[in-house]
């Protein structure tokens, strides 16, 4: 293996006092819900809110004085960009971060605020990489790769080192997987300290790149995922052999499972996580039989989530739980129709939070209108009661639900 436990221990010495030694906390409520002894390694508490702080610092610390003077370059649209920019600023190293042009402006500003030169180039990471290569060659910069680098893998491996020190009798560890730097480092550390521990990786089902690499498959990696931090099409050449050697299984998490995990961590643990950061919990919720009765360490890898996206996730979770009822009805387009519907919902103690009334953009006949009501309810039973009242009155409410 290119990275050893000794490399990870040296990385831990470098990181002492430079990054947060994040806590590993037990969750009584999640343990009860999932039927396992759940321990959360909270990497979302790092200064830049992700584990990327570790690998970035270790890589930068390994540079020669000449390389530091020349500067570094990184390609990223998220957590890696901020980690490299932050630690480069602290160490006085010039940093260029090349980001895709569609990168949200808030991420661009955060990276610039850490003193990095931000270059926006290309619509995709592949196009961005081409521009980064040109800049790197022209300026003689050192590439800080997000995962395919031994120093970075060793730095990320300190997560596993700390986790096993905090909970030495873990039965299994669950780790989000993108390019594989985190799970590669964690698995090397965990196997060295506790050979019997089982390691499980979790990918977004839309981006099964490591699953493909391990099993020799070619499933497509594409689509919009809430776990953009692990939406990687090609895993690292250094990380794949380590994963093959040490990881028991790669679990694929659906978008609904990822959304549910984000909401569960916020509502139960009051812990803010991004989609990738919630992947480990999503795996437990999707495969409870695999972890039942076992002591499980889950790496919560990051907490950088857009506030608007988080709001949508929480509202969609309310719909799935039956506490937010969205119904569509076709009614006669005449005075009193809407008032009657509102009255029925009010009588059932439902709270209408939104009304959409459509006459023009519809396939209905001209004398009918489409109405969509969004109603707050106590629970699924209360929602059923409201639906029953509407149907008893001759209406035909159609429930609108998010994809599961």
Image (cartoon, rainbow, N blue to C red):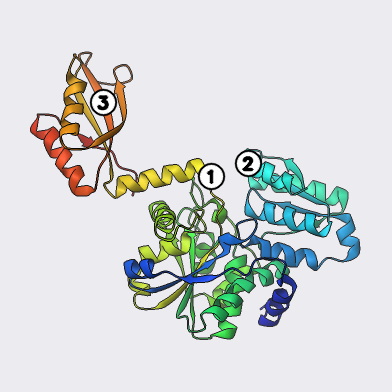
Pointer 3: what residue? 371
Quadrant location, the N terminus? bottom right
> Picture coordinates of residue 324 (x, y %)?
29, 42
Looking at the image, residue 338 lies above or below residue 217:
above
> Picture coordinates of residue 99 (x, y %)?
69, 45
Which residue lies at the image location 60% right of the left edge and 57% below the top edge?
49
Q: Secondary structure at mark 1?
A: loop
Which residue lies at the image location 60% right of the left edge and 77% below the top edge?
161
Residue 103 visible in the picture: no
Pointer 1: what residue? 306
> Picture coordinates of residue 7 (x, y %)?
71, 78
Residue 256 visible in the picture: yes
Which residue lies at the image location 18% right of the left edge and 20% below the top edge?
337
Q: Which mark is residue 106?
A: 2
Q: Which mark is residue 73?
A: none
- Please tell me which of labels 2 and 3 falls first in the chain: 2
Q: CA distance from mark 1 to mark 2?
A: 9 Å
């Amino acid at each position: 293996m290119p990275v050893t436990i000794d490399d990870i221990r040296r990385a831990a010495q470098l990181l002492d006092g430079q990054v947060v030694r994040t806590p590993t906390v037990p969750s009584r409520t999640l343990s009860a819900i999932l039927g396992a002894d759940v321990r959360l390694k909270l990497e979302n508490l790092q200064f830049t809110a992700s584990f990327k702080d570790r690998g970035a610092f270790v890589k930068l610390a390994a540079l020669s004085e000449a390389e530091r003077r020349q500067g570094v370059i990184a390609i990223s649209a998220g957590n890696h960009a901020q980690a490299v920019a932050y630690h480069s600023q602290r160490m006085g190293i010039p940093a260029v971060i090349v980001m895709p042009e569609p990168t949200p402006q808030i991420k661009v500003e955060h990276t610039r605020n850490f003193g990095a030169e931000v270059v926006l180039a290309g619509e995709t990471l592949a196009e961005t990489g081409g521009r980064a290569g040109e800049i790197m060659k022209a300026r003689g910069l050192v590439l800080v790769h997000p995962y395919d680098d031994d120093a970075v893998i060793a730095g990320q491996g300190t997560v596993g080192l700390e986790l096993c020190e905090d909970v030495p009798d873990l039965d299994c560890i669950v780790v989000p997987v993108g390019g594989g730097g985190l799970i590669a480092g964690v698995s090397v550390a965990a196997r060295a300290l506790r050979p019997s521990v089982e390691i499980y990786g979790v990918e977004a089902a839309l981006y099964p790149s490591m699953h493909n690499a391990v099993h020799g498959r070619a499933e497509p990696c594409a689509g919009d995922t809430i776990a953009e931090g692990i939406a990687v099409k090609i895993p690292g050449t250094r990380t794949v052999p380590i994963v093959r050697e040490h990881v028991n299984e790669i679990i694929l998490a659906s978008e609904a499972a990822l959304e549910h995990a984000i909401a569960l961590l916020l509502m139960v643990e009051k812990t803010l996580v991004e989609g990738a950061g919630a992947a480990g919990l999503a795996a437990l919720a999707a495969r409870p039989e695999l972890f039942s009765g076992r002591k499980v360490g889950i790496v919560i890898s990051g907490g950088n989530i857009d506030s608007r996206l988080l709001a949508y996730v929480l509202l969609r979770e309310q719909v799935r739980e039956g506490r937010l009822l969205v119904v569509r009805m076709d009614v006669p387009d005449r005075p009193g129709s809407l008032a009657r519907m509102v009255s029925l919902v009010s009588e059932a103690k439902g709270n209408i939070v939104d009304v959409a009334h459509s006459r023009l953009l519809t396939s209905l006949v001209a004398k009918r209108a489409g109405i969509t009501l969004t109603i707050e309810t106590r629970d699924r039973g209360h929602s059923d009661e409201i639906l029953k009242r509407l149907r008893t009155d001759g209406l035909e409410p159609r429930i609108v639900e998010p994809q599961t």
